[in-house]
Image (cartoon, rainbow, N blue to C red):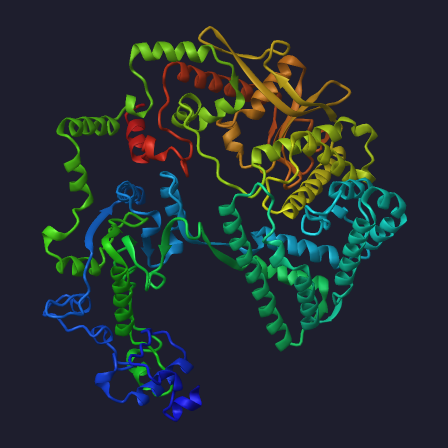
Amino acid sequence: MMDKLENEELPILDGVEYFYTDWFIDNTLIQHKIFEALIKIIPDSDARLGVYGKTKLEDVFRLYPAESKHHLANVIYSENSDHGVLLPKIGVFSESSPEGKGRKILHEVIRLLENNVAVSDIAIVARNPQDYVDLLMKWFDKIDVPLEMEVKKPLISSQVVKSIMLWFDLAKNYNQTTFPLDILLDDYYLTDDFDNKREVLKWANLQGEHTLQNWIDLWEKDKPDLVSTLGDDNYDKVFKILENILHLWSSLVQEGAAEDIISSIKYNLQNLHIEKRLTKFTDNTPLEERIMISYRDNQAFNSFKEVLNNLEDVWTATNRVGSLSGVLADIKDYLTTINYSYRKNYGNGIKVLSPTEIRGLEFHSVFVLGMEQNEFPKQVLQNPLLKDNDRLNLRKFFYLPLSNEIYEREKLLFYLVIQASRNELFLTYSATNEEGQSNLASLFIEDVLHLIPEDERLQSYKPKMVAKIPSSQLTHLINVETERNSDSFSVYEGCFKDEKILDKVKVKTYAKTFSISTLNNYAKCPMKYFMVSELGLTDEKEVKDGIYKPELGSIKHEVLARVLENYEDLDISNLVNIVSNVLEEVCQEKGYVGDEYPHQWLWELEKRNIIKSLSNLIEMELQRGALKPYLFEWHFGGEDKPFYLEVDGEKIPIRGIIDRIDRDEEGHYAVYDYKDRVSVTRKDIEGARELQLPVYIMAVEQLLGEVIGTAYLEIREEKPKQLFYKKGYKEKLGFDSFRSGEYESNEWESWLKEVKLQAESYIRNMANGHFPTIPHSCQYCHLEAICLYKPSRVRLKKMGGE
């Protein structure tokens, strides 16, 4: 192409009346040469849209300059020109907080949807959309409107990448590595048209774990029985699958040049047919989810292949030599530093775009975020190491943008945003930044508004809202806000004053049986407790690729209980197989067979992780301390094991389920609660914001005997967390490596007494109709739009003695 350009010929231009090249600044050397050659082919400057390297925006768009001191006027609008852009109606609003700005945007979106504007005909634009991802999701979850946006995640977090790395982890030492066969014989290999699929998996589960060659030998050894159960064709299918896996694993280069190892990895990937696997879903996966998940997983897989290509280039250039294990370790390390991106809710939501992405698109309404000076337009300064004069001198060799040209590009990007809006354009900016300092509104806002007569602009947000509110209702709202901002909690913040309501609340509270989680919820946020437990305002469940965490936790608890029930007869050497078999039993009983996952192999991967973590935890627990498992899933608070807290002369029943209680020969007890991941802090427990462990201790001491220690057992990390124990019993409990959490006997009793008093005060506050907005910590909450929590208000009330 360059040869033809240098000879001033380009066949592609033959018969073309107009030839348009997009305007940009950050071009490469080869692009610069192409532009220079094009200028030679079209020498007449009047025939060109602009002069390359000296272009001004009015030249690019062939707009006639308007007489205006505003530097956007000559780009966007000209009274005497047919080329001027027809501006949409424009509205501007600002707010001192992101939440306030979010409410305004949501209000306008709801108005548009009520006026039958399609979700797909609305766009949100930001100079850097990734800066707003979390905030936008938080806003739009409140009105249940989907967003089509680019989401970035660590590549190592993708289930597809995890399954690929599992394949190679098994393969790197396949002659020694043992594994359950169902990890490989998943839904991809044994499809629904494969007869007796469950019989194959049942046979595999009975065999335990073996190396790949042993699995092949076992399959051949049991051929008569398997043929009678499966038939000749199905027997041969499985045998060919096993032989194919052996062929792929043996093709991996174990030692040698890194480029050869990478090539063998690529060969495995090619023959795994990952792309086909990503299009297979369980029957109950809805079509929309299939499209979204398939798109997301393909993006992750393509990113993984790109990582392999990059590493191959580097290692080839450096002539690296190593082992398969070393290469895989480096790949894993590299994956932790790489993100992959995909568009969430593709084609099914409000689009979130950058100014360059919106080019050529058109929407009924466009919202622009971050219209602050130095964000849009971004701050443009001369590079101190390469000033504009130096850049001009270097242009004979390659193109470098000047600072004023970068600013021109910002103007062009804003022009593209305006051009994309047919009817309404909303420009939003924050009056203050995160540090509380004032923000300057973008100069573009003033420039655009200058071009539109005031009576043709969209009204700003606040006047429009006030105009819609009747004066009596407005007076009421002012009174409400006045009470909210007073130095005491009002009825509008969950503190009831009406005697009739208080009587009903008291009767209902004292008639209840409280669970530990109910008391915890009140301790963390009284207002949220009231809205969820009393009003039933629960958050909608998200669509997830698998079993919900509470249900998955129930499965793990049940497996731990069944395995540890017979701990004295437990064969530690065969622990993995025992846990695997019990997990299958529990899943079958609860009806979990993998249909909750879009891909069956994801369920197999989940089960493998469960088996590994539970086996390690059980082995560690049986070797720790003198106390041994005694009771599992122990219920208290019923008629046979009553437990009460006393509040104002009323006995309030408390119920709970303790995951595990250990006991020694002397009658000492230890109380444990299983957690997949422990997020509770020691301060939460000691400050009675987390009541689970101390209330469990009180119940066991009242109903069984002396408790000498307690802890959370974290399944994921396979170790105890947040330990509390009486002095002198650390070694008996097996807490040798832990120093904190030790109590003298009198300190132990004092701690439990304080927690008991605090728990009773929570119930008393409920009975007195006290549900204030004083959360222990306020992060994302689906009730945020209702409670309108503001830390400044709470500080004012605390100063007032509340």
Q: For the point 83% across and 35% down, which residue is it?
A: 571
For residue 583, say whether it is visible: yes
In the image, is 391 to the left or to the right of 742? left
In the image, is 353 to the left or to the right of 236? left
In the image, is 717 to the left or to the right of 197? left
- Quarter holding the N terminus? bottom left
Q: Is residue 253 above or below residue 4?
A: above
Q: Is residue 102 above or below residue 477?
A: below
Residue 12's spot in the image, x, y percent? Answer: 39, 83
Of the pair 313 and 264, the residue shown nearer to us = 264
Q: For the point 14% across and 65% down, which residue is it?
A: 70
In the image, is 669 to the left or to the right of 536? right
- Quarter holding the C terminus? top left
Of the pair 101 and 264, the residue shown nearer to us = 264
User: How many numbered tags mark residues here?
Assistant: 0
Task: Identify the image quadrant of residue 128.
Answer: bottom left
Q: Is residue 456 above or below residue 776?
A: below
Task: Identify the image quadrant of residue 355.
Answer: bottom left
Residue 309's spot in the image, x, y percent? Answer: 59, 69
Of the pair 677 and 703, the residue shown nearer to us = 677
Residue 403's spot in the image, x, y percent? Answer: 28, 73
Residue 170's spot in the image, x, y percent? Answer: 73, 55
Q: Is residue 692 above or below residue 613?
A: above
Q: For the point 38% across and 13% down, which residue is it?
A: 505
